[in-house]
Image (spheres, rainbow, N blue to C red):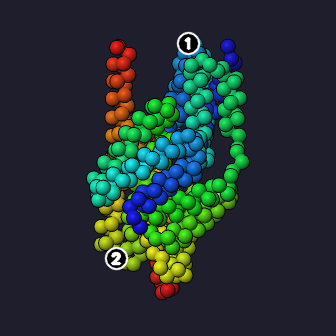
Amino acid sequence: MSWWIQLLSCGIAAASFSVLLKQPKNTIPVSSLIGMLGYSIFLLLHQTTLGYFLATLAIGILCEVSARIMKRAATLFVTGAIIPLVPGVGLYRTMRFAAEGRYSQAVQTGVATLLGICGIAMAITISSVLVTALWHRGAKKRGKA
Amino acid sequence: MDSITTTLDAVCLASQIILESGGETYRAEETVERMAQGLGIPRVDVLALPTGLMLTLTLKEDASISRLVRVHSRNTDLSRIDECNNVSRMVADGRMNAEEALKALTDIKRPRKEKRGAMIAASAVTAACFTVMLGGSWYDFAISFFCGALVQWVLTPLSRMRVPPLISSMIAGALTTLLALVGTLVLKEAHVEPIIAGAIMPLLPGLATTNAMRDTIRGDLVSGGARLGEAILSVMMLAAGIGLTLSMWGGVGL
C-alpha cells in the first residue's frame, strides 16, 4: 500500500472511532486531522519510542490549543486524535510470541510496547501542563495590554 | 432564590453525568464548584471518584447539607460531557437558574435511542481502516471490516446483560482473533497480523488511559491510580483473549 492510502485510512479510522466515542460532530474533523498529522510525524521518525513521544507531544499541544479556540474540553479532541498511535501491533506480537512459547521475544516486544505507552503518557502530561501554563501567561499579558 | 434541594439536585446530577460518561474526576469536581458558585452557595467541598461523589454545601456558619452519589456504570459518551459543560458554564455565568439547569440536565441524562446500525458500521470502518494503516492489503481490509462489525454487534447485548466490562473485553479479543484466523484460512492472500492489530485498536482503553494521566497530573491520585488499574486490567484481559485463541488454534494444528 502506498503511504498516502495509509495516511488517508488513518484519518478515516480516527474519525469513525470518534463516532464510536460519541464525540460532538463539529469536533470530529479537527481531531481526525490532528490524528493524521501525529501519525505522519510518527512514521517520519521511523516508529521509535522517541517517535511515540514527539508525535504525542504534537497531538497534545494541537488538541489543547484547538480546545481553547473552540471553547470545548480538551479530552474531546485528545481521545480521537491519539488512537492511531496506540501500539496495537506490539500488543498482538507480544501475545503471539507468548502463545508460541517464544518467551524472550515476547518479553522483548512487550517491553518495547510498554515503553511506547509510557512515551505517549508522558507526552500527554507534558503537553497539557505546557499549554495550560503558557496560555495562562499569554492571557495575563493580553489583559494588561 | 432557588430552593436548596433543587440546587443540590442539579449540582449532583451534573457531576454524576460527567462521571458516568467517562469524564475526568477533576472535571466533575470543577463543575460542582463552578455551578455552586454561580448559584450563590458561599462554600462547597466536593470529592469525586470514578465510582462515586461526595459533596457538602455550606450555606451559613452552622447550616450545611451533604450528599453522597454512587456511580455504578461507566460508558464513553463524549457528547454528554460536552452538553453538561455547556449547562455548567451557563449556570456559572448566571444565565440559568437551578431549576432550568435541573431540567436541562434531566434531558441530557435521559437514555437515548442507540443507533445500533451506525455504531456497528463505525466500528467496522475503524477496524478496517486501522488494518490498512498498519500495512494490510485489501483482503485484510475486508476481513477486518467483518471483525469490527461482529465485535460491536456482540458487545452491545453483552453490556445490556450486565456482563462485566473486563469479561466482554476478553470475549472481544478472542472473537477478533478467531475470525481473523478463520478469514486467513479462507482467503489465503490475507495476513493475520494487520487484521488483529487493526481490529483490536478500537477495543483498547484509550480514554481510560488519557484520563488516568490527566487525573494524576491534577493531583487526584486516587482516581488516577484507579483508572490506570482499570486500563491495565482491560488490556490484560484483551491480550488474554487473543493469546488463548492463538494457542488453542496452534494446538488444533491448522
Q: How far from the left and from the top, in percent, is residue B27?
A: 50, 34
Give the position of the C terminus of chain A as an image quadrant.
top left
Asked if the residues shown at circle 1 and circle 2 are in contact, with their CB atoms under 8 angstroms apart, the answer is no
Q: Residue at x 58, y 30 (%)?
A: B86
Q: How far from the left and from the top, in percent, is residue A2?
A: 39, 64
Tag 1: residue type?
A: Glu
Numbered tag placed on residue B114 in the rendering: none
Mark 1 and mark 2: Cα distance apart in space: 68 Å
Q: Residue at x 38, y 61 (%)?
A: A3
Give the position of the N terminus of chain A as an image quadrant.
bottom left
- Any part of residue A86 in sight: no
Same chain check for tags 1 and 2: no
Frontmost residue, B2 versus A80: A80
Q: Specify the subunit that label 1 lies on.
A: B
User: Would you place residue B152 above or below residue B110 in this image?
Assistant: below
Q: How far from the left and from the top, in percent, is residue A50?
A: 27, 53
Circle 2 sits on which residue?
A: A102
Left or right: where does residue A44 sit relative to residue B161? left
Circle 1 sits on which residue?
A: B61
Frontmost residue, B131 versus B97: B131
The answer to which quarter of the image holds residue B10 is: top right
User: Does dot 1 land on a helix, a strand or a loop?
Assistant: loop
Tag 2: residue type?
A: Arg
Frontmost residue, B27 versus B113: B113
